[in-house]
Amino acid sequence: MGLIIWLIIGGIIGWLASLVMKTDGQQGIILNVVVGIIGSWIGGQFIAPMIGGAGFMGYVSAFIGAVILLAIVNLFRRGRVR
C-alpha cells in the first residue's frame, strides 16, 4: 500500500511542478510520476536538510526538487530554462 501512495504523491508533485514550469502539455501521467519521484529524491537529498524535511516541508522540498529537475531537463532540451 505504501508504494501506491508513494506513486500517487509523486504523480501529484510531478504534475504540479510541470504546471509551474509550463511543460504539462508535453508530458503524460507516467512522466509526471517519474519527475515527481526523481524530484522527491533530489529534494530529499539536497533541499530537505536546509529547510528541515519533516512533515509538510518534506512535500515542499520534493516539489522544489521536481521543479529543479524540470528546469535542468528544459535547459538541456531547449537550451534555456523557460
Image: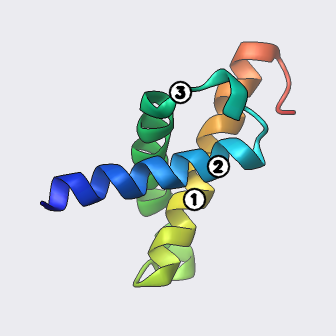
Does residue 6 sit above or below 76 in this rendering?
A: below
Quadrant for the N terminus, please.
bottom left
Mark 2 vs mark 3: give the one in front: 3
Visible in this render: residue 41? Answer: no
Mark 2 belongs to which amino acid?
Answer: Ala
In the picture, measured across the screen, residue 33 lies left or right of residue 17, that is left
Mark 3 vs mark 1: give the one in front: 3
Q: Which residue is mark 1?
A: 63
Does residue 81 sit above or below 17 in this rendering?
A: above
Q: Which residue is mark 3?
A: 28
The reply to whether dot 2 and dot 3 touch (C-beta < 8 Å) is no
The reply to whether dot 2 and dot 1 touch (C-beta < 8 Å) is yes
Mark 3 belongs to which amino acid?
Answer: Gly
**In the rendered structure, which disc, 3 or 1, sits on the residue that comes first in sequence?**
3
Mark 1 belongs to which amino acid?
Answer: Phe
Of residues 62 and 48, the one drawn nearer to the viewer in this rendering? 62
Quadrant for the C terminus, please.
top right
In the picture, measured across the screen, residue 32 lies left or right of residue 20, that is left
Residue 17 is marked as 2
Of residues 58 and 29, the one drawn nearer to the viewer in this rendering? 29
Residue 75 is marked as none
In the picture, measured across the screen, residue 50 lies left or right of residue 24, that is left
Mark 2 Cα shell of 10 Å, populated few (<14), some (14-19), many (≥20): many
- In percent of the image, x 41 and y 84: which residue is there? 55
Q: Alpha-carbon distance for marks 2 and 1? A: 6 Å
- In percent of the image, x 50 and y 54: which residue is there? 12
